Amino acid sequence: MIYVTVGTQLPFDRLISVINEWAAINTKTHIIAQVGPTSTEFESLECLNFVSPSQSNTYFKEADLIVAHAGMGSVLTALKYRKPIIIFPRKASLGEHRNEHQLATARWLEGKVSVYVAWDETTLLSMLDCGVVASEELLVSDYANEELIRNLKKFING
């Protein structure tokens, strides 16, 4: 299963349209897409405007692949559950966001373990066709690193 999420603030029809195009050809792949506040119809996807945080976590856990805008919440959750994620950054130049911070985020994340950046629609389709995999390396945890905790205690206690 592929879980696609655009976040809760803005629609991202350019991303969902590419996923819908791919899903029309790859009908055996189940795709759940959280599409935000859009009025566009996507006939090849199971679309939800919004999902609760707990339901979103369930989709992250069950998915084989995550596709998302370059939102850090989506990236961190995918890495926490050791899921590969393809990020497709929003572009302010196309009216998809207020500024180009998602491009900067994508540049910073590019090349990190289990994070794949699709800079354009053709690359996104290619990545979906080829498949991507997650690393077994744990990058994100609910708990602070023990060394960090020791160093913080040392700093606080002088």
Image (tube, rainbow, N blue to C red):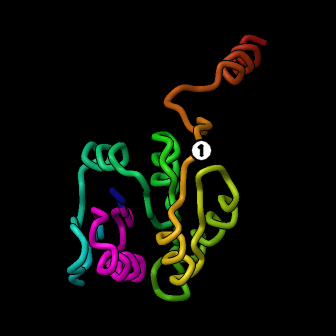
Instruction: Give the x, y percent position of residue 59.
Output: 31, 49
Residue extent of the magenta highlight: 4-32
Q: Identify the residue at horizontal 33%, vertical 63% (top origin).
A: 8
Q: Which residue is mark 1?
A: 135
Which residue is most to the bottom? 94
Specify whether residue 27 is painted magenta: yes
Can residue 12 be seen?
no
Q: Nearer the viewer, residue 72 or 33?
A: 33
Q: Nearer the viewer, residue 95 or 84?
A: 84
Q: Identify the residue at horizontal 33%, vertical 56% (top origin).
A: 1
Q: Identify the residue at horizontal 52%, vertical 45% (top origin).
A: 79
User: Three-letter amino acid code at disc 1?
Assistant: Ser
Specify whether residue 31 is painted magenta: yes
Write down the quadrant of residue 37 in the picture: bottom left
Image vertical order of residue 105 relative to residue 152, above or below = below
Instruction: Give the x, y percent position of residue 117.
Output: 60, 67
